[in-house]
Amino acid sequence: MAPRYENMTRADQVRARRSIEPARRKPIPQPEKYSRRNAESSARVTVRRSDQSMAKPTSAAYSQHRRKYYVPAGAPGTEIRLPALPTVKLSWRLASALLAILALVGIYMVNSSPNFMVSSINLSGAVRVSAQEILNTIDLEGTQIIKLTPEQIRQKIAAAFPDVEDVQVSVDFPAEVKVAVKERIPAITWYENDTPLYWVDEQGYSFPIRGEASIPMAVHAAGEPPRPLGYQTAQTEAAEAESAKTPSAPLPSVDPGFVEMVLKLRGIMPSGTALLYDPENGLGWTDPNGWQVFLGTVPADIDLKMAEYQVIVASLLERNLHPVLINLEYLHAPYYRLEH
């Protein structure tokens, strides 16, 4: 006989009730978003496949990645589907390999094709120097354009042609060599024994006589001209260039101050007379009265020397003296020489 509830404690009553019926718990209410997420998670199914099922996708699978193209037809609402094309993706390694192959092929073609061989040059700025002379000197005929170095070509031209003041060289594809030169302007023609030897420009550079030019002055010399400070002979320059294995540009061989002196005398000396040069006395000429006058080689005080010369000539003529030489190389120590 079951015990009565009146004689039981409250704890015993709870235990008795639990033994009669199971406990019913109310579910904890959850927000709507958590319920939806739990439902979606429960719908997911994880399938584990064996190694045999991990085979490569078939062509049918690849066909899903093909691009589909539709072209609208003439009628409204109709279109034509073009054949699908597969999507091709190139990796950066494959692209680099293709670029390297193309570069090698291009280098081989440039290095072996006759279309890239130099056969002529485009010369500009030259009047007396011909393009064929320059081409024969630098020897570029038959050379591949990829092997040329403009600076080396410029050095060869400058060393071989002293009458060229400046050279600019550029190389263009497929086989064009452009050479722009600036020729020196001759200022003096140097004579020895009435034979023209070379030209000299205002900077003192001497170079061979080539073609024709309008020369302001001609110097009839009895020896070599005054050399600039630090001048080296042609033999020394050739030896240094050979030891350096590089062609060297020419250096001034005539003192620029001497050239300045020559050009100043152009407007001072009597017309119709030849300008003379003597290594001992300097520059001068033969006066119409028959004597020789020399003024040295330094252009300084040229006006004072000419004024002094006029005073000396007047004094000699007044005394009825006929000199053979009047030397004013030194302004404060002029002298004259009479006939014996």
Image (cartoon, rainbow, N blue to C red):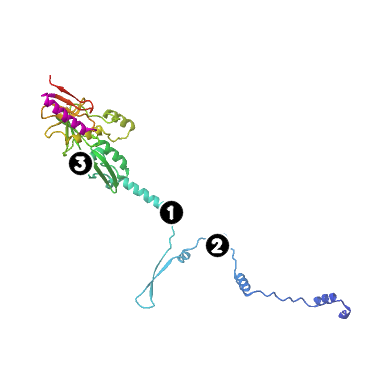
- Above or below, 36 against 150 in this view is below
SS at mark 3 in the image: loop
Q: Start and end of the magenta stretch?
A: 300-323
Image coordinates for residue 30, horizontal then vertical, percent? 66, 74
Q: CA distance from mark 2 to mark 1?
A: 31 Å
- Mark 1 burial class by Cα count in 10 Å: few <14, some 14-19, many 20+: few
Label 2 neighbourhood size at 10 Å, few (<14), some (14-19), many (20+)? few
Q: Nearer the viewer, mark 3 or mark 2?
A: 3
Dot 3 and dot 1 residues touching (CB under 8 Å): no
Separation of residues labelled 3 and 2 (CA atoms):
82 Å
Residue that mark 3 sits on: 130
Residue 177 among magenta residues: no
Query: Which badge, 3 or 2, comes first in the chain's sequence?
Result: 2
**Compared with residue 21, is residue 311 higher up or lower down, i.e. above or below?**
above
Residue placed furthest toward the top: 340
Residue 77 x, y percent position in the rendering: 39, 77
Mark nearer the viewer, 3 or 1: 3
Q: Which residue is mark 2?
A: 53
Q: What label does residue 94 carry, if any?
A: 1
Q: Amino acid at mark 1?
A: Leu
